[in-house]
Image: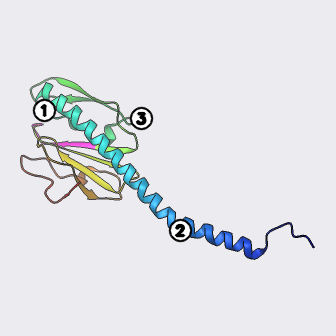
C-alpha cells in the first residue's frame, strides 16, 4: 500500500517544533521592536533639541508645546508669545507621528525640559535643554502627559530619572 500523505505523528511533531520556535523567537522580536521604537523617540529628541536651540538663539527663550499641539501628521506649527513682546512661529515638521513629544518651559522661557515617548516604546526620554546633559529616562507604558515631566526650573529637575 502506497502512503501519499503525512501521518498524524509527523504533523504533530512539525507543529510542536513550530510552536517551540515561535515561543523562543517572539519575545526577542517584541524586545527588538520596543528598542527600535525607543530609538525613534531618541531621534526625535535630537530634532527637538536642535530646533529649540535655534529658536532660543533667535528669540532668547524656549518654545513650549504639548503633544496635543501637533498635527495628525506629527508636525508642529505653533505661534509662541515672546516674553520681549510680539510672537514667533515655532515649526517642527520632521517629527515621527508615532512619537509623542512636549517641551515644558518655565514662566520666562529660560529653562526647558523636552520629553518624548514612542507609542510602541516603554520609556519616556527627557532632557533639560538649557544644560549640556545626557538624556534621562523613566519607564512608562502609558501615553505621554504633562504630569509625567517635572516643572522646569534653574536647578536639576531630572535628578530622580535614570541616565539613558
In the displayed structure, 126 sits above or below 76; it is below
x, y percent for residue 120: 41, 52
Q: Residue at x 77, y 75 (%)?
A: 8
Q: Residue at x 12, y 37 (%)?
A: 109
* Dot placed on the residue nearer the N-terminal end, 2 or 1: 2
In the displayed structure, does residue 10 sit left or right of residue 61? right
Q: Residue 23 got which mark?
A: 2
The segment highlighted magenta reads 102-109
Q: Which residue is mark 3?
A: 73
* Dot placed on the residue nearer the N-terminal end, 1 or 3: 1
Q: Residues within 10 Å of mark 3 (few under 14, many from 20)?
A: few
Q: Residues within 10 Å of mark 1 (few under 14, many from 20)?
A: many
Q: Residues within 10 Å of mark 2 (few under 14, many from 20)?
A: few
In front: label 2 or label 1 = 2
Q: Residue at x 6, y 50 (%)?
A: 155
Q: Which residue is mark 1?
A: 61
Name the residue nearer the viewer: 43 or 54.
43
Residue 93 shown in magenta: no
x, y percent for residue 10: 73, 73
Mark 2 element type: helix
x, y percent for residue 15: 66, 69
Q: Quadrant of residue 49?
A: top left
Amino acid at each position: 500500500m502506497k502512503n501519499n500523505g503525512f501521518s498524524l505523528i509527523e504533523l504533530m511533531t512539525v507543529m510542536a517544533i513550530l510552536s517551540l520556535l515561535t515561543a523562543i523567537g517572539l519575545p526577542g522580536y517584541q524586545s527588538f521592536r520596543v528598542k527600535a521604537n525607543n530609538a525613534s523617540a531618541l531621534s526625535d529628541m535630537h530634532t527637538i533639541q536642535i530646533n529649540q536651540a535655534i529658536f532660543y538663539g533667535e528669540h532668547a527663550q524656549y518654545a513650549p508645546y504639548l503633544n496635543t499641539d501637533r498635527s495628525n501628521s506629527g508636525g508642529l506649527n505653533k505661534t509662541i508669545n515672546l516674553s520681549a513682546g510680539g510672537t514667533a512661529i515655532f515649526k517642527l515638521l520632521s517629527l515621527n507621528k508615532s512619537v509623542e513629544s512636549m517641551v515644558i518651559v518655565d514662566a520666562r522661557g529660560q529653562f526647558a525640559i523636552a520629553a518624548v515617548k514612542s507609542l510602541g516604546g516603554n520609556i519616556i526620554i527627557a532632557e533639560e535643554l538649557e544644560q549640556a546633559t545626557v538624556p534621562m529616562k523613566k519607564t512608562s507604558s502609558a501615553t505621554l502627559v504633562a504630569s509625567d515631566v517635572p516643572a522646569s526650573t534653574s536647578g536639576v529637575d531630572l535628578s530622580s530619572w535614570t541616565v539613558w
